[in-house]
Image (tube, rainbow, N blue to C red):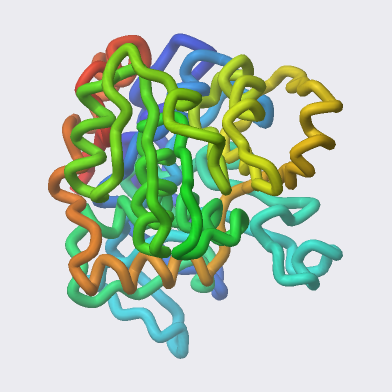
Amino acid sequence: MLTVDTLVCVEPGRLRVEQRSAPARSADQVLVRPLRVGICGTDYHIFEGSHPFLRYPRVMGHELAVEVVEAADGSGLTPGEVCVVNPYLSCGQCNACLGGKPNCCVQISVLGVHQDGGMTGLLTLPAASLLRAPGLTPDQCAAVEFLAIGAHAVRRGAVTGRDRALVVGAGPIGLGVALFARLSGAEVVLFDRDAARAEVVASIAAVVALPEGSAPQETGEGFDVVFDATGNARSMERGFDFVGHGGRYVLVSVVNEPITFRDPDFHRKEITLLGSRNATREDFDRVLAAMRNGEVAIERLITHRTSLADAIRDIPHWATKKAGLIKAIVDIG
């Protein structure tokens, strides 16, 4: 029986590589070989035990570049081609799906969160989950999903060229938000306590990075749209103060605790509060187009690399030592 190396988060704080049986492909599935797996805040939260939607043990990995190994006739997919994966598996029948929002499907199953993901040698996926990406490198393909989350948040915030936007949190998701807010024409300010990381992002996205020791409230009367991408409840609560009158506040982060705000200020400003979850095919297509147009310098965003075996050592380190870290990639191929 064919087996493949698989990285498993057995329980919070414990990773191990296991030998697992290679999956069998059903008629409507595609057998793929993961080549690159991006590591994001979700994966660190899984490792740390702070993710609200997860059961252990779990194979992480939802930011995927994969090579097609076997595909059914008529799928349009060719063995050997490299594809992007949309990791949000929806039911297609609930009100959210029928309303064009499969990203928040009632029964959504996200690879690497609700079901085992891509940190393995072989994986089966529905053909509809694969997006062809001719001309893109495996590194670019692995970055599409996290950038699509940013693109979706920007679309949720209805960002236009007349807006002043604040993005709090210069991790990979905040980076994606800043990039696509800027591509939408907004004036963008990026705030992160890691000034060096904010400056790197600013050099790529042509946004203003607030210097160390500064704070968003020093920039004027408030922002037309504020995005929180910190994954920190206190930061999410503080963000209400930065929204200008008539502005929008988009919570891109998710935390497993209550978020509160002061109602008189909320009503005085008539703030619109929005949640932003995952992404849709429209957002994936937006990112693919931006990459093909040379608008995303992904080679400057990938700062750390590891292998499947070495991830046991590196993921715990990166979970606590994020200085200089923007995007880490597990190279399986």
Residue 227, percent across and down? 54, 40
All told, the count of numbered labels is: 0
Viewer-side residue, 8 vs 211: 211
199 vs 21: above or below:
above
Q: Position of residue 234 (x, y in %)?
A: 61, 15
Q: Closer to the camera, 32 or 268?
A: 268
Query: Percent position (x, y) of residue 218?
Result: 44, 24
Nearer-the-camera pick, 300 or 24: 300
Quarter-of-image position of residue 202: top left
199 left or right, relative to 50: left
- Residue lying furthest bottom: 74
Q: Residue at x 32, y 27 (%)?
A: 210
Residue at x 35%, y 10% (from the top left corner): 320
Residue 172 spot, x, y in % from top left: 36, 38
**For the point 51% across and 39% down, which residue is it?**
112
Q: What is the quadrant of residue 182 in the picture?
A: bottom left
Residue 312 in view, yes or no: no
For image coordinates 68% across by 42% down, the residue present is 245
Residue 182 appears anywhere in the view: yes
